[in-house]
Image (cartoon, rainbow, N blue to C red):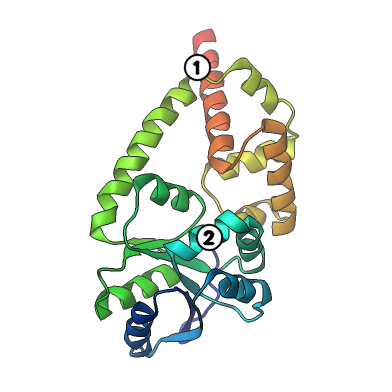
Amino acid sequence: MEKEQRVEGDKIKIVIFDEDTPFVHKLKEVIQAAPDIEIIDVRRNMESAKEFLLGVQAPINLILVSFNILKEVVASDMGTLLKLKTTLPGTRVVVMGERYAEEEIFRMVEEGIKGFFVKGDISSDFIIKCIRVVAAGQIWMDSNLVSRVFEEFSRYYSEAEGKLRAPSPEETDRLALLTKREMELLELVSMSLKNDEIANRLFISTKTVKTHIRNIFEKLGSRNRVDATLLYIGASKRQAHGAAAGN
């Protein structure tokens, strides 16, 4: 689990990125009634949101961002989100939208976004609970989204299981390119550990962890942690089955 930025008694510091002025006004009224949450800033368009992200200095616990602004930022400047991940690693993101498609939710989960809700449900209890849950390190989604996400994950891992059973010889050969340290680190990545947790286990810096992961991805031809994990686990299963057959 990621290390918490705040300690008991501190306020949860949040920013809001949303272009819907009436919605933002109602959202601010709800949040300002909670004594443990503080709104640091509100930005109402993509350029203003990017300006804030690139210039922010003080720690932010959570960003509430509309799905429309998030899509615009990703489409125009992925570097902004990458900078957010490196400069504010403890900051969590909750996406607010009118509706979601299954593939959109799954992609956002892969990218580390921690919460989702549909704007139609804006009750004070719902919003405050969402902010507190995500700020505490958990994942939040409303009941209408839960079943859709589970269906998407089930479909994905059903397909992934097929990949795990049959890694290609070329993919297996790529693992031989990894150093002993990179293999240690890949094993921890396959256990879903975060960068800071890996750094603590291996007694190295998070910067070194990121460098190792980048090198692993390049050697394996992997796009992300999921790809690298599938290859590692698949090769491990083949090795285990081969050892069992030889006994």
Residue 194 seen in the current view: yes
**The residue positioned farthest toward the top in the image shown:** 246
Label 1 residue SS:
helix
Amino acid type at circle 1 is His
Residue 205 seen in the current view: no
Q: Which residue is mark 1?
A: 241
Identity of the residue drawn at 44% across and 73% down: 19
Q: Earlier in the sequence, mark 2 or mark 1?
A: 2
Q: Which residue is mark 2?
A: 72
Q: Quadrant of residue 216?
A: top right
Q: Residue 62, labelled with which disc?
A: none
Q: Nearer the viewer, residue 10 or 24?
A: 24
Identity of the residue drawn at 71% across and 45% down: 214
Give me the C-alpha separation between circle 2 and circle 1.
47 Å
Amino acid type at circle 2 is Glu
Query: Dot 1, crowdedness within 10 Å: few (<14), some or many (≥20)?
Result: few
Q: Position of residue 122 (x, y in %)?
A: 27, 74
Q: Nearer the viewer, residue 14 or 118?
A: 118
Q: Position of residue 3 (x, y in %)?
A: 55, 67
Residue 76 higher or lower than 239, as above or below: below
Residue 116 higher or lower than 103, as above or below: below
Residue 154 higher or lower than 82, as above or below: above
Q: How many marks?
A: 2
Identity of the residue drawn at 24% across and 58% down: 143
| Tag 2 and tag 1, C-beta contact below 8 Å | no
Identity of the residue drawn at 66% across and 55% down: 199
Left or right: where 23 falls relative to 3? left
Label 2 residue SS:
helix
User: Which circle, 2 or 1, is nearer the viewer?
Assistant: 2
